[in-house]
């Protein structure tokens, strides 16, 4: 199916073009000079993407043609926005991010090489689950843990700092997918009706609840609320896809609401976040500052935006930020401010298309594990985008997760390219089997 | 030289290329979807439904194996049977090997294969030597354990 590879190749050209145009616009705005430097950045980017494309062509000739270009587009968006921040604030975020992008693609290639038969993941599911839980635990350990804004998100080993929740999300999804693949039938068969609601049998749900409950506990322990929301969504999506029982999802939602209520009243960190979400004006220059500035900045964008490098990110004449954490939490705000409603919709459309392609992969896959894995990976990816975009637009309380592939952050980039590698592996096998008529 | 018009042009050019790109991908994805629908009569979001080209099948415990008679195992996508915990259908039977036999689909048919077990596998009373096709209602016997195969072919 080289037609699909050709389509992938063709799709990478506009992505590189967009990156070039973005860089050119930032140059034009800041240095009042157009050099061919932006063109060479665009060419570098295209060269890296082409190398990856050739690798996919050799290793996974049948894989989905659109996933990689769409993810490259998100990365390009991130690079342009980070470069634009660098040019105003000074710093080397864009260069770091570009390095992480290259490292992410190397990891992508290694994963495809090593896990060509990804069903081995199923055999190590308890090991993977344990490692993921240990990773979630790590930020609370003395010496290597570090705290930012009340949340223990990162670990630092010497010069390297790392957000383990990003990798743990993939590990937990692998565990859930492989466990449910084996036990889904038992969950349905052993179900009992009580008060008109079908409950899953506790015996078979047990190990699932233990691992998943431990993950939720860790996330509350390290106060990473955004990730806990993602885990929950992935868990419910997988249960639904594995059993086809809507009642299990409803029970899950009820459990979530009950849990959220208890946590809201007992964990002060959560109470603060929710109160600020409900009424940011109660502390406009303190806790509510970030979300309020985010909304004003987005309103400034209008329909078509103020243009690249035009949004105000620092208060003029000072060094204090007008958009705090513009490179991570508020990067979506920055894009909306500079490219307007149309730019913002394009970003959301990109995530939607990735989700659509991911679920397509799940539909095409022939075995239960592949289907569940593709569904789970797509759900965490799409839900992460929802959690942060919903957060900055005040649809849900703002929690600090990264906008996948756009926000600045090495572990996020690495984890998402690992996720892409797994999706493409599943897709390659599914489409190959479909073609051979199995 | 004034760069304002260039900036504005770049912004609108960026948005235009971006939207054309996304529309192109959305259009191709839609075409893909339609082709699929024509191909295998529609597909559902849950894996409990019929996937492309193969039908759902079950193994129902008839007797033995330390399993409750009537317990149903989904064999969709293929399963392994045996005494080991690694087997998809795992049961206790002193005549069963760790990985005793496997069931797998090819197209819309299911096949049974003995995986070099010590004591062999019987299908409807006959020993399984190479791969044999499964029919709805076929009886698999491993040691003292018996399963009935059910194929849900419309």
Image: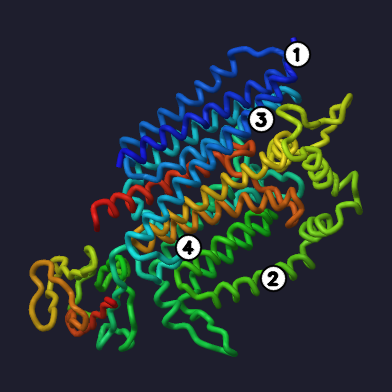
Q: Quadrant of residue A397?
A: bottom right
**What colouring does the structure picture have?**
rainbow
Do the residues at discs 2 and 4 belong to one chain? yes
Residue A257 numbered tag: 2
Residue B12 numbered tag: 3
Q: Chain of mark 4?
A: A
Q: Earlier in the sequence, mark 2 or mark 4?
A: 4
Crowd around label 1: few <14 · some 14–19 · many ≥20 (10 Å): few
Crowd around label 3: few <14 · some 14–19 · many ≥20 (10 Å): some
Q: Which residue is mark 4?
A: A176
Q: Which residue is mark 1?
A: B2
Q: CA distance from mark 2 to mark 3?
A: 44 Å
* Image quadrant where one finds the N terminus of chain A: top left
Q: CA distance from mark 3 to mark 4?
A: 44 Å
Q: Earlier in the sequence, mark 1 or mark 3?
A: 1
Question: Do the residues bearing badges 3 and 4 touch, measured as CB atoms within 8 Å?
Answer: no
* Residue B90 image point, x, y percent: 30, 74
Left-right relation of A175 to A287: left
Determine whether A233 is above or below B122 in the image: above
Do the residues at discs 4 and 1 belong to one chain? no
């Amino acid at each position: 199916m080289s037609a699909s590879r050709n389509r992938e190749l063709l799709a990478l050209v506009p992505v590189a073009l967009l990156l070039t145009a973005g860089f050119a616009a930032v140059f034009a705005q800041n240095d009042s000079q157009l050099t061919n430097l932006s063109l060479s950045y665009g060419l570098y980017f295209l060269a890296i993407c082409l190398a990856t494309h050739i690798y996919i062509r050799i290793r996974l000739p049948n894989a989905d043609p659109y996933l990689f270009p769409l993810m490259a587009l998100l990365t390009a968006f991130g690079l342009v926005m980070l470069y634009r921040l660098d040019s105003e604030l000074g710093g080397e975020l864009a260069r770091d991010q570009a390095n992480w992008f290259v490292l992410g693609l190397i990891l992508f290639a290694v994963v495809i090489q090593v896990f060509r038969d990804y069903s081995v993941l199923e055999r190590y599911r308890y090991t993977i689950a344990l490692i993921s839980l240990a990773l979630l635990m790590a930020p609370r350990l003395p010496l290597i843990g570090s705290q930012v804004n009340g949340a223990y998100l990162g670990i630092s080993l010497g010069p390297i700092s790392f957000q383990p929740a990003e990798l743990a999300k993939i590990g937990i999804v692998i565990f859930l997918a492989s466990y449910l693949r084996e036990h889904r039938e038992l969950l349905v068969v052993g179900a009992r009706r009580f008060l008109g609601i079908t409950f899953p049998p506790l015996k078979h749900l047990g190990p699932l609840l233990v691992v998943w409950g431990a993950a939720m506990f860790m996330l509350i322990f390290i106060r990473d609320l955004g990730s806990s929301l993602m885990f929950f969504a992935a868990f419910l999506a997988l249960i639904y896809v594995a059993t086809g029982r809507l009642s299990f999802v409803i029970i899950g939602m009820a459990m979530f609401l009950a849990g959220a209520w208890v946590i809201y009243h007992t964990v002060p960190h959560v109470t603060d976040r929710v109160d600020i979400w409900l009424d940011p004006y109660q502390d406009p220059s303190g806790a509510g500052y970030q979300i309020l500035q985010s909304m004003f900045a987005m309103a400034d964008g209008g329909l078509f935006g103020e243009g690249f490098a035009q949004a105000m990110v620092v208060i003029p004449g000072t060094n204090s930020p007008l958009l705090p954490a513009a490179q991570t939490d508020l990067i979506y705000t920055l894009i909306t401010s500079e490219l307007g409603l149309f730019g913002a919709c394009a970003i959301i459309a990109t995530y939607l298309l990735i989700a659509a392609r991911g679920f397509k992969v799940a539909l095409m896959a022939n075995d239960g594990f592949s289907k569940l894995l593709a569904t789970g990976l797509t759900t965490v990816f799409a839900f992460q985008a929802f959690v942060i975009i919903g957060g900055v637009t005040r649809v849900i309380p703002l929690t600090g997760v990264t906008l996948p592939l756009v926000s600045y952050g090495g572990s996020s980039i690495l984890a998402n390219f690992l996720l892409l590698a797994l999706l493409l592996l599943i897709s390659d096998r599914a489409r190959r089997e479909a073609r051979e008529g199995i | 030289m004034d760069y304002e018009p260039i900036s504005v042009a770049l912004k609108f050019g960026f948005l235009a290329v971006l939207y054309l790109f996304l529309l192109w991908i959305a259009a191709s994805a839609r075409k893909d979807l339609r082709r699929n629908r024509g191909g295998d009569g529609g597909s559902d979001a849950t894996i409990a439904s019929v996937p492309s080209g193969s039908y759902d099948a079950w193994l129902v415990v008839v007797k033995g194996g330390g399993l409750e008679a009537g317990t149903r195992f989904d064999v969709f996508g293929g399963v392994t049977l045996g005494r080991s915990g690694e087997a998809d259908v795992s049961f206790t039977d002193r005549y069963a090997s760790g990985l005793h036999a496997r069931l797998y689909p090819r197209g819309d048919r299911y096949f049974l294969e003995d995986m070099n077990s010590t004591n062999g596998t019987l299908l409807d009373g006959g020993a399984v030597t190479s791969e044999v096709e499964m029919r709805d209602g076929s009886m698999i016997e491993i040691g003292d354990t018996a399963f009935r195969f059910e194929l849900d072919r419309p």
